[in-house]
Image: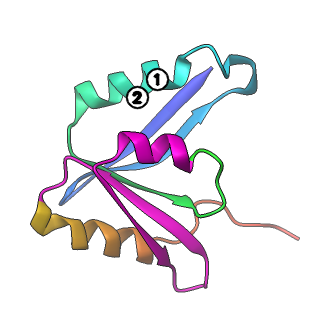
Amino acid sequence: RGAILLEKLDFGYYLSKFAVGPQARGEGIGMELWDVMLETTSQIAWRSRASNGINRWYATRADGQQKIRDASGGDWVVFWKGIALEAIPLAIQYCQNRPDDFETVH
């Protein structure tokens, strides 16, 4: 019904995937997953496509955010929570240089 995938990095954790199945949306599953994740770590960064409708939800849970463009020209928003001030540039750089998780096959 939902899943979170975290990757351990130098600045804390990178939230690679945050997903709630369509049948579970509106039931609070996302918030439950979020709370469990924060029990695991208090230092987390993630990115979301600039056009993603969940960005408003992310923004209310993040300590900060930065719009970026990756090497292939994709527009993203990097979010962070609990990241040390001096590590925020490292988290942003990681998100900017990270390749897409999925590849479009023609």
Please tell me in which quadrant of the rendered image residue 41 appears.
top left
Mark 1 residue element: helix
Disc 2 vs disc 1: Cβ atoms closer than 8 Å? yes
In this image, 80 relative to 30: left or right?
left
Quadrant (top left, top right, bottom left, bottom right) of the N terminus: top right
Question: What amino acid does circle 1 point to?
Answer: Met
Residue range (magenta): 55-84
Give the camera-side residue of 64 and 23: 64
Question: What amino acid does circle 2 point to?
Answer: Trp
Disc 2 target residue: 34
Q: Position of residue 38 (x, y in %)?
A: 28, 30
Residue appearing at x 52%, y 86% in the figure = 71
Quadrant (top left, top right, bottom left, bottom right) of the C terminus: bottom right
Whole-number angstrom distance, CA of label 2 to CA of label 1? 5 Å
Q: Is residue 77 above or below residue 20?
A: below
Toward the top, the furthest residue is 27
Please tell me in which quadrant of the rendered image residue 28 appears.
top right
